[in-house]
Image (cartoon, rainbow, N blue to C red):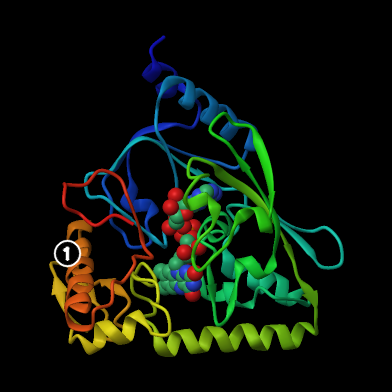
């Protein structure tokens, strides 16, 4: 049996899946192979066999921070979809990597567990939020993660403490030396509070977001990280780029650090705006903006990759 035959026949694996379906931005060409699973043992077997067969594996979550190439992704694309949420003692919450952060925030609020209110504004999964140390309003995953469990490329589970995750601003160890690992679960340490108060804080974060950021329109979240002591959005706006369009993509007229899909954008449209914003801010203000969005898949040479 060839490397390809076993994967073609693996239960639940499909070929040439359009990844635009799995991207909140609604953009992306096909995955050579694609599967979703909530079973860690299935995921472990896939990782082990792909590694043995030399097939690249790309993991995606809810596709809210990822720009997928118009030309798609080689190899296997997998989404780990375990959405389990379990309170294991008074204030420890165990989450499957597929749990959506807004649901985590609301569920924890209703149980009177504080610390993850910011999750209401992060429309992605727990696994990716650990990967990128998602955060907002002064709190981030690093503040609440006790530990997380991932599978290495051989399918072996490894549990890392928060300290070993080496969290930084939108950064974790998974972004560099553990790049090929797939996070399957995380434990969060929260603290008890009045459910009403936790819910009020959660609602006020949501209201603030709706007022200041594009809402109800496809975007990728913040395009660039904020440089030290400044805001990427302020710099892009000051460079006169708010509202700039490239094909179907636009630098949001509401918040310049967001690119929105206004009319069937392609990933090339977005990458063009990213390049223009980066170069214009560098030329005008001498600031090198660093990409926060993640670009996955095949791309013509010269594209900016995160
Ligand atoms: C409107 C909007 C608002 C946003 N606001 C915020 C915000 O306030 N704060 C913030 O931090 N982010 C924000 N984001 C960005 C985004 O929601 C977060 O980065 C989120 O954590 C990404 O989750 P996801 O499941 O969509 O990840 P994806 O976009 O699917 O993937 C992101 C990266 O994580 C990797 N990954 C995914 N799952 C796993 C896994 N299980 N194991 C290992 N790696 C994995 C992928 O390979 C990819 O590199 C916002 C996005 C949008 C669209």
Q: Tell me which corner region of the image, top left, top right, bottom left or bottom right, holds residue 166.
A: bottom right
Q: How many numbered tags mark residues here?
A: 1
Q: Is residue 129 visible?
A: yes
The one of 198 and 49 positioned closer to us in this rendering = 49
**Mark 1 surroundings within 10 Å by alpha-carbon count, few (fewer than 14), some (14 through 19), many (20 or more):** some
* Place of residue 295 in the rendered image (x, y in percent of width and height, measured from the top left): 32, 54
For label 1, the residue is 272
Position of 130 relative to 40 (above/below): below
Front residue of this view, candidates 169 and 69: 169
Residue drawn at x 25%, y 43% is 298
Q: Quadrant of the N terminus?
A: top left
Q: Quadrant of residue 15?
A: top left
With 64 as the anchor, is 189 left or right in this view?
A: right
Point 15% across, 75% down: residue:
245
**Residue 30 in the figure: left or right of residue 128:** left
Residue at the spot 34% in from the left edge and 57% down from the top edge: 306
**Left or right: 273, with 232 as reference point:** left
288 or 136: nearer the viewer? 288
- The yes-or-no answer for disc 1 within 8 Å of ligand 1 is no
Q: For the view shown, which residue lies furthest in the top direction? A: 1
Residue 13: image location, x then y, percent: 44, 31
Report x, y in % for residue 25.
33, 63
- Residue 195 appears at what percent x and percent y? 77, 82
Q: Is residue 147 above or below residue 74?
A: below
Viewer can see residue 265: no
Is 34 placed above or below 283 here? above
Element carrying mark 1: helix
Q: Identify whether 101 is placed above or below 200.
A: above
Residue at the farthest right position: 90
């Amino acid at each position: 049996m060839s490397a390809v035959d076993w994967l073609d026949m693996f239960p639940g694996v499909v070929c040439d899946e359009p990844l635009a379906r799995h991207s909140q931005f609604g953009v992306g060409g096909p995955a050579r192979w694609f599967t979703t699973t909530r079973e860690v043992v299935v995921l472990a077997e896939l990782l082990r066999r792909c590694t043995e067969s030399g097939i690249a594996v790309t993991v995606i979550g809810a596709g809210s921070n990822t720009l997928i190439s118009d030309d798609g992704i080689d190899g296997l694309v997998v989404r780990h979809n375990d959405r389990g949420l379990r309170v294991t003692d008074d204030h420890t919450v165990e989450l499957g990597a597929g749990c959506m952060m807004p649901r985590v925030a609301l569920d924890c609020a209703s149980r009177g567990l504080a610390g993850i209110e910011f999750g209401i504004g992060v429309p992605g999964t727990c696994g990716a939020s650990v990967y990128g140390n998602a955060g907002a309003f002064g709190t981030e995953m690093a503040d609440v993660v006790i530990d997380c469990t991932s599978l290495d490329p051989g399918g072996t589970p490894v549990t890392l403490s928060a300290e070993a995750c080496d969290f930084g601003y939108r950064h974790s160890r998974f972004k560099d030396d553990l790049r090929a690992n797939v996070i399957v679960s995380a434990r969060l340490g929260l603290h008890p509070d009045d459910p009403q108060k936790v819910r009020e804080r959660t609602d006020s974060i949501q209201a603030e977001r709706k007022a200041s950021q594009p809402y109800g329109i496809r975007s990728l979240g913040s395009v660039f990280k904020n440089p030290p002591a400044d805001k990427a959005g302020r710099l892009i706006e000051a460079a006169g780029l708010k509202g700039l369009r490239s094909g179907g993509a636009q630098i949001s007229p509401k918040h310049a650090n967001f690119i929105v899909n206004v009319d069937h954008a392609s990933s090339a449209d977005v990458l063009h705006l990213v390049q223009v914003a980066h170069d214009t801010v560098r030329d005008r203000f001498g600031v090198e903006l660093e990409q926060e969005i993640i670009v996955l898949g095949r791309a013509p040479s010269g594209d900016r990759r995160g």
